[in-house]
Image (cartoon, rainbow, N blue to C red):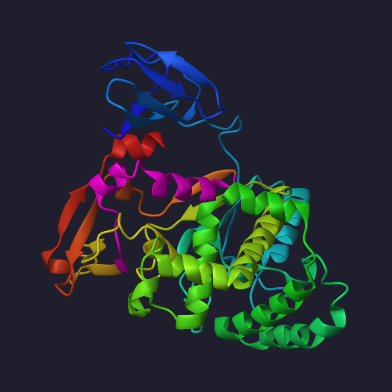
Amino acid sequence: VPVLVVRPGQKTLLPGPGELSLEDGTVLRVEAALPPDLPFGYHELRLLNEDRTVRVIATPGVCDLPKALRTWGWSVQLYALRSALSWGIGDLADLRRLARWSVSELNAGILLVNPLHAATPVVPQQPSPYFPSSRCYRNLLYLRIEDIPGAAGARLDLERLAVAGRVLNRERRIDRDAVFRLKREALQVLWSRFGGAPAFDRYWREEGESLVQFATFCALATHYGCGWHNWPTEYRHPHSPGVAHFSTEHAEQVRFHQWVQWLLDEQLAQVATELPLMQDLPIGVDPDGADAWAWQDVFATDVTVGCPPDEYNTQGQDWGLRPFVPHKLRAARYEPFIQTIRSTLRHAGGLRIDHVMGLFRLYWIPQDAGPGVGAYIRYPADELLAI
């Protein structure tokens, strides 16, 4: 058993003595049972007689409700929240301005925002926020370039890009590819002038290997294009020697993508100081994206998820998203799911889970078979809800 879920007051018997390492670093000796008052979090139990480790998930068992059970707020599609200073797409500075106004003038209590997750950093840009490359990191299109440290000193170098970006506001439709090209060029200018910052160092250290893998994926995608299934064989698995060599050889590019994520994290944190954000979690990820590459051993490879035919859609629906394999996810001690939830709740006051039924069951469709011949696969809902 790779995972144990415990709740307050629950008596959990053990097959023998062990050492319990709590999330805060405290180590406890346990004999026949776990303590009934474990602090909430993720702990490691080493069973001495069996020489194996079990992840202990100590959960309250219920949601922590806010004191004010009723409030109001906007549902915001950030890409459409354009202002005169936007570069053709709504950004985090626009969201911060809306949040400040909503609190001061209208007494709003929350903002529900569309998924802000990362797309693969290539053209064409994925237009759907519900088809992300990664649910753990964010989309560089939402950066306000002028608010990045060092932008004031680089104003002359950025002015041409800023003018071109604001011209895009005249278009009725959002041109994500044009926005991406402009912001990518501006970020390269600012990266070349970046001399380091203690806050950036703290961020990449805290994010650890997960951020390194994501940034390496972005660097690989820049070199070899979208679709890691078609990359050279030595780069198709994140733990291959080829990927480690690439990451070392292209360390500057990898660090650039880490820096971009730090900038997004900083700007999102500034929004959250104005008004609590309710983040939105998509049901899945792009099969050719960063999460599907990093956790490919946990995803199903020959199926997608959707829904069966019904009166609303007599042909059924195939969303093109890869599902986690339940027993593989559990064998991975739920680490991909834990990272996803933690990342989406960062700087958030609430969480909307798209198709929350997916925590209980998902409709799997065999590759190239069509939605009419799929089947529902059950998931360990009690353990996913505990997380």
Q: Is residue 82 left or right of residue 213?
A: right
Instruction: Say which of 132 and 91 sits in front.
Output: 132
Q: Quadrant of residue 324?
A: bottom left
Q: Quadrant of the C terminus?
A: top left
Q: Is residue 27 magenta?
A: no
Residue visible at 65% across and 56% down? 265
Q: Is residue 49 visible?
A: yes
Coordinates of residue 32 in the picture (x, y in percent) = 32, 11
Q: Is residue 115 visible?
A: no
Q: Residue at x 55, y 27 (%)?
A: 25
Residue 237: image x %, image y %?
36, 65
Q: Residue furthest top?
A: 32
Q: Is residue 312 left or right of residue 26?
A: left
Q: Nearer the viewer, residue 71 or 371?
A: 371
Query: Is 69 drawn above or below residue 99 in the view shown?
Result: above
Q: Is residue 328 above or below residue 294?
A: above
Figure check: 330 above or below 306? above
Q: Position of residue 264 (x, y in %)?
A: 65, 61
The region drawn magenta spans 320-348
Is residue 226 rendered to the left or right of residue 50? right
Check the image and report above or below for 144 versus 376.
below
